[in-house]
Amino acid sequence: MRERQTAQDARRAREFHAFVAGAGGRLLHAATLLTAEDPRDNPRARRLLTPVLAQTYASWDRLRGEDPYDRARLCLATRFARGAWHRYGFPGRSRPSRPGALARLSPSERLILVLRLYEGVAEEQAAALLGLSPERVRTICDRAVTTLLHPPRGPAPAAIGAKVAPS
């Protein structure tokens, strides 16, 4: 009995190791996109991903044909959304000041953009995952894409040699 349990544990560890070897990089990249960190320096993304992988490993035997990547992605999105809620209140309210294109987006915009465009999750699935209507997901995704494609302009440069009127 003990030998059989040891063999099952070893098989489970090999399968999970193979999963992480194949999907770990993509999950880390998704977490890095969610946290809007530099890919070379992403401590928040790593802290976000570590419990996701631990939870996936803990439920490995209960997956029963379910795709472990889908489960891990769901857990990653849920943890990010929950963390954004606790950190900023409503996920769309505050924008942390970090460098990078995705840092201009709110946490909810980043989440929906990563799910839809990077992960290829269907609009209806993203809506069900987040508890939103598909129309709301579409609107947030469109707004995020517009923000990325048309960033706000900085202040206009001062005209050379122009006199400034005293106030």
Image (cartoon, rainbow, N blue to C red):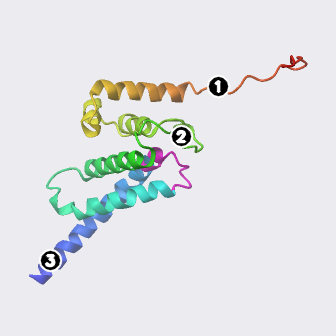
Could you tell me residue 151's position as x and y percent?
A: 58, 27
Residue flagged by tag 1: what amino acid is it?
Arg
Of 164 and 149, nearer the camera is 164
Rendered residue at 42%/25% (across/down): 142
Could you tell me residue 7's position as x and y percent?
A: 17, 76
Between the residue at mark 1 and the residue at mark 2, the CA separation in whole angstroms equals 16 Å
Between the residue at mark 3 and the residue at mark 1, the CA separation in whole angstroms equals 62 Å
SS label for mark 3: helix
Q: Mark 3: few, some, or many residues within 10 Å (few <14, many ≥20)?
A: few
Q: Which residue is mark 3?
A: 5
The magenta stretch spans residue 41? yes
Rendered residue at 47%/47% (across/down): 35
Res 13 quadrant in image: bottom left
Residue flagged by tag 3: what amino acid is it?
Gln
> Vertical placement of 53 versus 69: above or below?
below
Could you tell me residue 163's position as x and y percent?
A: 89, 17
Residue flagged by tag 2: what amino acid is it?
Ala
* Quarter that holds the C terminus: top right
SS label for mark 1: loop
Q: Which residue is mark 2?
A: 103
Could you tell me residue 38's position as x and y percent?
A: 56, 49
Which residues are drawn in magenta?
31-42
Q: Mark 2: few, some, or many residues within 10 Å (few <14, many ≥20)?
A: some
Disc on res. 153: 1
> Vertical placement of 111 versus 167: above or below?
below
SS label for mark 2: helix
Res 138 quadrant in image: top left
Q: Residue furthest left?
A: 1
